[in-house]
């Protein structure tokens, strides 16, 4: 299971590519390479335009597996 967490997942469809990077560094590289690609965790942001007006995104980036983005640390001076 840990080996899967370290791998980038890429799902290629007819119109779009969904990329789930495995680390923060890779996310930043992907966003630099695809600056117009939305960052998506769920479909709230991209669902309405796709369903209502038929738009699509060639590349979609999902940061959901990046551990650093889902951890909250509590310190004496607040959250970090």
Image (cartoon, grey):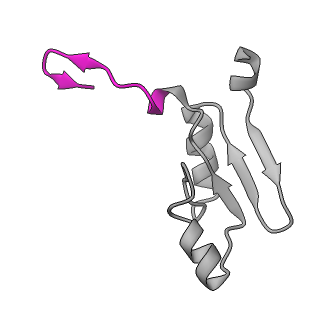
Measured as percent of width and height from the top left, residue 9 is found at 75, 39
Q: Position of residue 14 (x, y in %)?
A: 86, 66
Write the residue at 72% across / 66% down.
Answer: 58
Image vertical order of residue 19 relative to residue 15, above or below: above
Q: Range of the magenta residues?
A: 68-80
Q: Is residue 53 left or right of residue 4?
A: left
Outermost bottom residue: 53
Residue 6 in sight? no
Q: Position of residue 17 (x, y in %)?
A: 76, 57
Tell me the residue at 61%/47% (across/down). Answer: 62
Figure quadrant of the N terminus: top right
In the image, is residue 11 part of the stretch drawn in magenta? no
Residue at position x 66%, y 38% in the image: 21
Q: Is residue 60 visible?
A: yes
Vertical placement of 4 versus 59: above or below?
above
Task: Compare residues 5 and 51 and report the one nearer the observer.
Answer: 51
Please give the name of the residue rendered at 56% of the width and 60% of the height, measured from the top-left corner.
Answer: 38
């Amino acid at each position: 299971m840990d080996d899967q967490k370290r791998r980038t997942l890429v799902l290629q469809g007819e119109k779009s590519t969904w990329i789930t990077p495995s680390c923060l560094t890779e996310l930043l590289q992907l966003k630099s390479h695809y600056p117009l690609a939305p960052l998506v965790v769920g479909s709230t942001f991209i669902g309405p335009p796709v369903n209502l007006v038929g738009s699509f995104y060639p590349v979609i980036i999902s940061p959901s597996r990046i551990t650093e983005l889902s951890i909250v640390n509590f310190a004496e001076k607040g959250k970090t």
